[in-house]
Amino acid sequence: MPPPTRTSARTLILANGATLIAALIFHWAPAWLLWPYWIQSIIIGWYARKRMLNLAQFSTEGFTSNNQPVPENEAGKRSTANFFTIHYGFFHFGYLVFLLGQHRVSGLWNMLVLIACGVSFVLSQRTTYAAQHASDLRGKPNLGRLMFTPYLRVLPMHLGIIFGSGLGGGSGLGGGTGLLLLFTGLKTLSDIGLDALDRNLAAKIAKDTARTPG
């Protein structure tokens, strides 16, 4: 069986490659690529919440809420996960409003392609989550750090949304082809690098905080 790193990287390449091919076939404007990337960002957030809730043991050292230390118990874990969901969800709702206003989805094929992209990203993130969760069980990760990690992972996508708003509406097969290739290439490299960093960080934390027997 291939290692999780290789499997996840391959799935990300396939998912981004399929998105690029769809963009060229259906003459998507470069900025329209922000739709599958928004979907991917939502998937990352969902798995991040699941990761926090499934922690068996964790630390809240240096992590406060309302100027009070977050307790290292079930209530502290759930309140943190709920705050993350509200905060992360609020910003993504704002991005959704932007996308609906500027790049509304139309046509059955476009909808089906977005669904396929979402499935591909779920498969990739599921592999990453499995590796992260296994590492979490071997150590004592910091809950506050876990809450902020997804923002680092999706930052390139959010910068892409800002950048993408100025890409214009040119045809994917016209002058926008170069932008499609550049945007997708940079996005794929960022995905692979940050995905690997995410899992390696989890493994390092597990090693540094490994629970001693007894």
Image: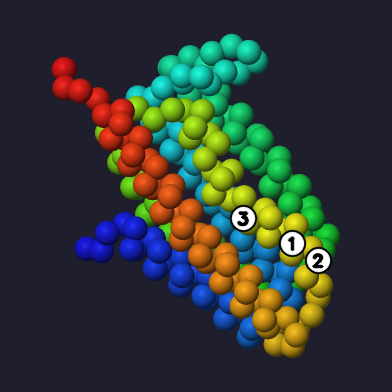
Question: In the figure, is residue 24 to the left or right of 48?
Answer: right
Measured Cα–Cα span from mark 2 to mark 3 = 16 Å
Tell me if residue 113 can be seen. Answer: no
Tell me the residue at 54%/30% (across/down).
Answer: 81
Vertical side of 132 occupied by 79: above or below: above
The residue type indicated by label 2 comes to Gly
Vertical side of 17 occupied by 130: above or below: above
Farthest residue in the top direction? 68
Tell me the residue at 61%/61% (across/down).
Answer: 37
The residue tagged 1 is 163
Helix, strand or loop for disc 3: helix
- Quarter of the figure with residue 59: top left
The residue tagged 2 is 166
Residue 1: x percent and y percent? 22, 63
The one nearer the camera, 63 or 11, is 63
Tell me the residue at 46%/65% (across/down).
Answer: 12
Vertical side of 139 occupied by 129: above or below: below
The residue type indicated by label 3 comes to Pro
Question: In the figure, is residue 150 to the left or right of 67?
Answer: left
The reply to whether dot 1 and dot 2 touch (C-beta < 8 Å) is yes
